[in-house]
Each structure stands twice: as C-alpha cells, then as structure tokens.
Image (cartoon, coloured by chain):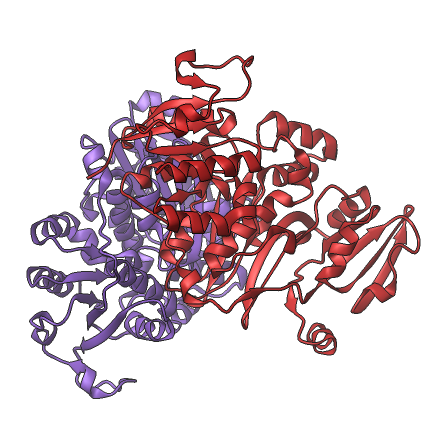
Chain colours: A purple, B red
C-alpha cells in the first residue's frame, strides 16, 4: 500500500540536515534522498559529494524522483522550484512560509491543475501539527479564532530578556547561534515571519486567501527599557501574539506584541516554544504547544509530510468550499500602550478613545483604543513603539461610538 | 467522494445530546441520525418519540444504517453492541473508554476480521485530537513518553479545592451537576477513568495492548487537609497525572496524584481542561490542552470521527507492526510522600530509599523512593494516601542499588 518514495532536496541548511538525520533514524517511512541541490560550491558538507548537485534540472527533470523537498531561503526562487516540480509531475514538501504566504492561492490552483500535492506542515510552528489538525480534525467544527505565538526566535529573545535580564542584542545573537532565527533577523523581530504563518493558517482555518501585506504587523525591535520596566512593575510579560478571528462574514487579523498577565496560558510558553490556540464553536479552546524552531523539530514536521505522501495525502482546503463569502478586513480597533520619545509624535487625536498618558525617563506613553490602521501608520514611522494592553482584544469596528461603548 | 452516512445511536445522555446538537449546527458533515436506542421508557426526552427505540435490533439489523454510535454507560453491554455492529457490517464510533481499555485487542481483531472501522477519539481527553495525532502525525517519530491530565472531573475538583478553597465533597457535587463526572464517581476519583484512557493511548503510542488491571492507579479520594496544607505551604498544587513511557524494550505506566510546582506546564491546566504531553525523539515535547469533558467538546470529538468515516478513515495501529517486542512492566520506582494516621501502617522498610518522615495534627507522613507495586499494595489498604513528590519521575528498576544511586 505504501510507496517507496525517492526525494530530491533543495537546500541543505538547518532544516535539511535535520530532515536527513530524522529520516535515517526512523524505520517507518519508506523514503530515501536521491539528490540534494545546493547553491554554494565552497561549503564543507557532512555527506559525500555524490549526493549533491548544483543544477536544479538534476532533480526537476529526473523522472525517478517522486517528491521535491524545498528547503531554501529565497522565497521567489523557491516558488519557481515548486512550480517546476508540479509541472514535472512531482509532489512537493516545503517549509517556506514566506513563499507560501505570498503565493498560496497560486499554489492551491497549481495543485488542482497538475493533480499533485503540496504539503507544508513544517512552515507553521515547527513541530506542532496545526495545519493537519485544522484540515482533518476541525473540518466539521466552526472555527472562531486562531491565535498564539508563532515565532520561536522572538519568543526566545523575549524569554531571555525577561527571565535572565539579558540585553536585547545579546539575546538575538544567542537565538541566531542556536539556529532559531532567520538569516535575515528583520523577518523575525519585525514580525513578518509570524505574519506569513498567520496568512497560511487563515487559509486553512477560514478558507480565505489574504495577501500578507494586508495583515498589519508590528515587531518587537522597538521595545525599550521603559516598556520592560512597565511590564516588570505590573507582573506582566511581553509576547509577540499573532491572531485571526471570524466575526459575521469578516476575518480579522493582527500580529503585534502584547503585555500578557502571568496567569495567561501564553505566559508560560517560553524560549523557542510556539503555541497555537484554536477556538471552535463546540470543541471550545484548544491549545497546542511545541518547539517552533530548530533543526530536528522542523525536520520532523517535514518528514511527517513526506510520510503522508506515501499514502497519497493531500490538503483538501475544505473551508474554502464551505464558506466562500468571508473577506479579510482591518476595520477593527484594539487597546494599545504607545511609547515614543519625540513630543508630538503621538497625540490624543490618534485614539478612538484615549485612556491616559504617562511621562518619565525621557520617554512618553499614551494608552487608549486605536484603529488597526493607526498601528500600521505607526509601524511605518520611527521612534514609536506599540504594545497591546493586557487583556486587549481586537474588536470589529461596527461604528466608532459602538466600539467605544463596548470598551467602556 | 463523501458518503451520506446514516447513523444509529445507542444512548442519549450528555454526550449523545451534545452530538445531536453539534451535528445539527454543522454544515460540513454528511450524516444524519436515523434511530436512537435508549433504555429507560419513562425519561422525558427533547426529541419527538419517532426517532427513539427500545430494541437494539432496530439499529443493528437495519441495513440502511452505516454507522453505530455507541454512547452508553455499561461497558459490557457496549462491547456486545460494538461486536454485533461489526458483524452486521457497520462501522462504529464510540466514546466508551472502559469498554475500549478492557477489550482493545479484541476490537482490533474484530476490525480486521469484519473489515470495518472502530473510531474512538471522544474516549480520550474529550476534544483533544490525541489519538488521531498519535496515529497520523507521529507515525514516523519515535515516541518516548505520553503523559498528562486525562480526567476532567478530578481536575475540576482539584482546581476548586485549591483555588476557591472548597471542600472536596462540595467540589465533587459541583462537577457532577455540570456533567463532568461519571455516573459512578469512583471511576473518576479513584483514577480508573484516566487509567482506561492511558491504556488506549499506550496502544496507539507504543503499539502495546496492556490490560488495564496491570497498570497501577491511585486516586485523589484520600487527599487530606494535611496534604493540602503541605501543598499550599510549598507553593505546590496537586494534579492527577497519568503517564507512560518507553525505556529499552519496556513500557512503563502509572496514574497517581502528584505535587506539581507552579511553573510546571500542567500547573496551569485548570478546571475541566485536560492536557496531553507527547515526547518524540525529534519533535521533542508537544503539549495539547483542551476541554476534556462536557457535552459539546466530547460530542464534537464524536462528530469528528463520524466525519472521518465519510472518507473511509481507519486507525492503522502502525506502531503495532513497527515495534512488536515491547512489553509492559511495573518494574520501576518513583519518589512519593505517603501520609497515614495509624502508626505502623507505613514503615521505613517499605521504601527502597527513605528520605524523611514528618508528624503533626494526628497525621504522619514519610517520603522516599518506592517500587510501583508498593503503591498498588497501599491502594488496596485503607487510611494510606500516596502523592508523588514534586518533580518525581518513574524510573526503570535496573537494580535496587542502581536505582537508589540514580536518585542520590
């Protein structure tokens, strides 16, 4: 029943080597790596040179290879590989969240067109089987919301900064040394990486393809000593939270740091761990916690996809057919604490509802309810930091008066 | 591709009514309830009487019915229904953990013999899709351990006792009123229910069928005011923890209350929530948290199984074929705190390694390392309470000297 799959790998970095290791330590998966396509001719590699190639045709045009495993950094080059693989009748396993987030609708169409599967569990929250669960287990449940900590390196940094009182830079360097951080740390610390993952989950949870640029993201790279002091004084921690939810026929989403109370389930998710909370109409809240980064956890998720291909598994994107009138919108508000150093950068008129202002140590801050678009505006300017207030939720903007009333 | 399934229900209690509700609120599942077989002729029921029957043949011999959904209390009667359903060519969905734990090998054989599926996600940890994940997602991962809080009602009771300083009896009554506790509370508070669930998970995680009576269980019904005071004085809580793990070619398991430190992930699992932690060789620790009891969460799990039958899903019991030389054993030790009121009931010679003794308020206690069989012996006598020490693990007993050395 099970097939013996021949794999062609693109990329042999952290995840590729992790996959190689877990594949060879596992008895149950009938798959072997035939060829690995790499870019640099000068790198020292842990395997004999026979298995490596520098020409992508050696994999894409080899009719003996059933599955292309795409594990390179460059999103556009990765998309070209995925397209070519499908066109040549191969299934694809990838962990490239940026590529997926930016091309998910095309990848969906290409799967139908070429009748081949693209699986990508490793792209979201490492070892947590969240896509498979959304696809399989929640297919009959009406999902209300998906939220959590989707980025291991920023969570590692925030944990170190809070628990061990390390400096931000020191914690970032440590995360990179451990292989948790992307080669471009801006993708992590400016919250693009968790946004890409949120984009993918929105497709599987709600059946909506949204362009990542439509989702607002605010990073953790502007967090100041004043913010940290505020958190410590109030027994709070800061987490980078990604969230999406359904209300009426709209989907809302946001990725931003938030002050989190100590008893909150996300508060205990530490270091490179990720967490995804799924709220269904009947199953209610489910929390999945697991390692979100690292060579073996992600390699293990990639191997799970390869294993699923041995029995012809495909994503069905069921919600896409179930609920087709949903649209993504940023017409919502949330409560934030904004800190800034230049007087006049933030004013009371920026808020839908202004709660209060603080001043000290050459730093100023204001608290209140703002539209999500205001957070985007602030993200494009310098010297302004936004952190969601403790317990703050994103609320659909029915009307300004109504929203303000809800918060009152 | 999807079939339109006709269902025959046995039982219409808490879970049955939950299933009825979620099935009617869900668009995606092509299934309808044709007949419901109930026992009592006098109960008031929320549906018209046409759908009910008191004769099981009306379901079992109706060739129009594809799936028998078994949701009754009595384990032996349930097993007869499952057998008869399979013999009559019907697939089965059940949430009866006791029946499953006691007959899992026979149910496995019957599935092969009659070529029909038995699915039972609702039997373990309510809404948490743990069996499906062990079957599907971890099939290539070498699982080291499965542990967690598998019983919603005892966790509810322990939460209320600790957080709201309620009495034990008051908290139990509240749990029953909310529909979390079994009709026979002894199954919950004496830790049989979580043991049945552990038995089922051992089959899917390690491919071993173990008789539930071989697994040692110690309940929460002997917890005294002294134990609670000890916990509060040391910033600990008490949780009823079920655990199983693999070491060499052996599987070990135990269900017993344990003192849990505040920063431990299980510490924040409160009320009727359940948690399962799965440790794999490569994916490392994964934690799943969700509602483990209640009408809708369990009904929703049952519906997931029905939905899976529409695309001919079956458990493959892959680990059964992968690793067949594993055996279950109780040859292990763990560190416990034993409290008792009658002097002489517990003595230093009961311990492999004795750590210390305490006395006060007419209660005495001793701490140290014991063999698991000692815990079973104490569970059969009255007036002795056993709680695992904070951070205590179950350790294979290589030799007494070696084990004592490991702990030193």
* Residue B165 percent across, percent down from the top left: 72, 35
Residue B220 versus residue A351: which sits nearer the camera?
A: B220
Q: Quadrant for residue A74, please give it.
A: bottom left
Residue ID at (61%, 51%): B212
* Residue A184 percent across, percent down from the top left: 26, 66
Q: Is residue A259 left or right of residue B396?
A: left
Quadrant where the C terminus of chain B is found in the figure: bottom right
For the question of whether residue B283 can be seen, the reply is no
Quadrant where the N terminus of chain B is found in the figure: top left
For the question of whether residue B298 can be seen, the reply is yes
* Residue B43 percent across, percent down from the top left: 55, 14
Residue A82 versus residue B215: which sits nearer the camera?
A: B215
Residue ID at (59%, 46%): B194
Q: Is residue A185 above or below residue A287?
A: below
Residue ID at (31%, 67%): A29
Q: Is residue B235 above or below residue A178?
A: above
Residue B107 versus residue B14: which sits nearer the camera?
A: B107
Q: Is residue B228 left or right of residue B117?
A: right
Numbered disc total:
0
């Amino acid at each position: 029943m099970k097939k013996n799959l021949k794999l062609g790998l693109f990329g042999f970095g952290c995840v590729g080597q992790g996959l190689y290791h877990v594949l060879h330590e596992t008895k149950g998966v009938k798959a072997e790596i035939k060829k690995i396509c790499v870019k640099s001719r000068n790198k020292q590699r842990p395997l004999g040179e026979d298995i490596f190639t520098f020409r992508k045709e050696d994999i894409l045009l080899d009719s003996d290879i059933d599955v292309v495993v795409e594990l390179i950094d460059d999103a556009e080059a990765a998309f070209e590989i995925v397209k070519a693989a499908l066109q040549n009748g191969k299934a694809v396993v990838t962990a490239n969240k940026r590529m997926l987030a930016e091309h998910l609708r095309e990848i969906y169409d290409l799967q139908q067109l070429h009748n081949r599967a693209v699986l990508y569990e490793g792209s979201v929250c490492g070892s947590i089987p969240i896509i498979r669960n959304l696809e399989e287990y929640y297919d009959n449940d009406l999902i209300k919301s998906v939220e959590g900590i989707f980025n291991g390196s920023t969570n590692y940094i925030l944990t170190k900064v809070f628990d061990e009182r390390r400096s931000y830079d020191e914690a970032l360097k440590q995360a990179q040394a451990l292989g948790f951080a992307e080669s471009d740390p801006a993708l992590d610390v400016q919250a693009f990486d968790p946004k890409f993952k949120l984009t993918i989950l929105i497709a599987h949870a709600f059946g909506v393809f949204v362009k990542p640029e439509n989702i607002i993201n605010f990073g953790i790279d502007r967090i100041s000593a004043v913010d940290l002091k505020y958190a410590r004084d109030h027994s709070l921690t800061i987490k980078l939270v990604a969230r999406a939810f359904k209300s009426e026929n709209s989907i809302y989403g946001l990725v931003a740091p938030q002050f989190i109370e100590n008893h909150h389930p996300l508060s205990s998710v530490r270091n490179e761990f990720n967490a995804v909370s799924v709220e269904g109409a009947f199953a209610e809240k489910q929390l999945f916690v697991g390692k979100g980064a690292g060579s073996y956890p992600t390699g293990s998720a990639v191997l799970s996809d390869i294993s699923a291909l041995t029995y012809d598994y495909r994503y069905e994107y069921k919600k896409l057919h179930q609920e087709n009138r949903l649209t993504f919108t940023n017409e919502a508000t949330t409560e934030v604490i904004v800190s800034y150093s230049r007087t006049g950068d933030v004013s009371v008129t920026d808020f839908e509802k202004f709660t209060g202002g603080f001043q000290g140590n050459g730093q100023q801050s204001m608290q209140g309810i703002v539209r999500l678009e205001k957070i985007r505006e602030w993200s494009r300017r310098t010297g302004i930091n936004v952190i969601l207030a403790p317990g703050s939720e994103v609320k659909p903007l029915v009307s300004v008066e109504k929203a303000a009333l809800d918060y009152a």
